[in-house]
Amino acid sequence: DLRTSIDGFKFDNVFMNASGVRCYTEQELDELVQSDAGTLVTKSATQAKRLGNPSPRYARLELGSINSMGLPNEGLDYYLNYALNFQKAHPDQPIFISVAGLSMEENLAMAHTIEDSDFNGLVEFNLSCPNVPGKPQTGYDFDRTQEVLTNLFSFFTKPAGVKLPPYFDLAQFDQMAAILNQFPLKFVNSINSLGNGLMIDPETDTVLIKPKGGFGGVGGAYAKPIALANVRAFAQRLNPQIQIIGTGGITNGRDAYDLILAGASLVQVGTLLQEEGPAVFTRLKRELAAVMQTKGYTQISDFKGQLKTL
Ligand code: DHB
């Protein structure tokens, strides 16, 4: 039994895509719906459609990936329409919409659009896109994060959470958790990619992606210990009503198990889903169920957050 829930929203299993991966077009979203994923999130939306950065803008690495997509997306209305149609056909299968405005004003305008719509799923406010030149990640500016959330929750009443960048100092976890705990968030999603990494092709002495001189967000196995630390650190600091979505470093069912041990209620798959396609969810479900069986666990709550220390 891999079922889970967030704020009364029930999901058939703990697995979903990470936003950005295979969730750009209706066709990709439909393929996620058809897959064994427990739910899905749409590509981070801006108000208007965007083409994003020049290609190549994604590269596979030995242990993961690097990307600087630059927020290519079809615009909020496209994803909101998809979600409204989906919820009509599948009223018992809640999904997520991801929102990533390039300014606070754009985020608030999109939040108003969603608030005024019939959308009845969850909204992921992405405070951690590293790839738009000249636009720093909100999640690394604590005062700005406080300001965005204050303005947002002055009117926004639908179930919402935030997607955060990775933090690396325990004082950052203390400060960010103290901010997040002031708001009626339903979830916190950690982590987005390791921002602004760089890899070099040894044959040509060249960077691997074109935007920003080769700098881009790193995902995959490189992210696993950072993701675990961020999930664990927030699980230890956030109000218990705020559930955690664990993202980063999943290549097999044991990786998902580890994120859940650290405190995650749902887990998102990015690089691995990009590389293997939506059939990966079938394998991950089987592998997670096998780990649970070995441990004698029958449901997620048997081990969620039960990480042991020495
Ligand atoms: C993009 C990358 C991200 O990591 C993110 O959170 C949002 C957008 C992108 O480059 O498109």
Image (tube, rainbow, N blue to C red):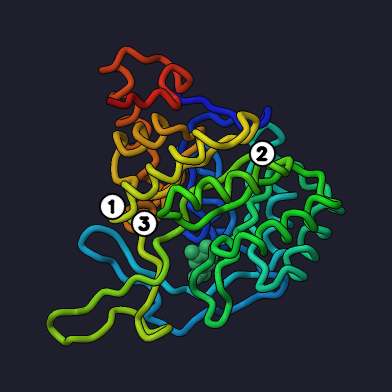
Separation (CA) of disc 1 from disc 2? 27 Å
In the picture, which quadrant includes the C terminus? top left
Res. 11 image quadrant: top right
Among all residues in the image, which is located at the extreme left? 203
Residue occupying image coordinates x 69% and y 50%? 83
Residue 36, percent across and down? 45, 38
Query: Circle 3 sits on which residue?
Result: 271
Mark 1 burial class by Cα count in 10 Å: few <14, some 14-19, many 20+: many
Residue 221 numbered tag: 1
- Element carrying mark 1: helix
Q: Secondary structure at mark 2?
A: loop
Residue flagged by tag 3: what amino acid is it? Thr
**Residue 225 percent location from the top left of the image:** 31, 47
Residue 90, given in percent of the width and then of the height, sits at 68, 37
Q: Say the numbered circle drawn on residue 286.
A: none
Badge 3 crowding class, 10 Å Cα cut-off, few under 14, some 14 to 19, many 20 or more, is many
In the image, which is nearer the foreground, mark 2 or mark 3? 2
Residue 186, label in figure = 2
Image: 156 above or below 139: above
Type of amino acid under label 1: Ala
Residue type at numbered disc 2: Lys
289 with respect to 30 (left or right): left
Mark 1 or mark 2: whose residue is earlier in sequence: 2
| Sequence-wise first label, 2 or 3 | 2
Q: CA distance from mark 2 to mark 3?
A: 25 Å
Q: Give the residue at x 30% y 74%.
A: 198
Judge whether residue 121 can be spotted in this image. Answer: no
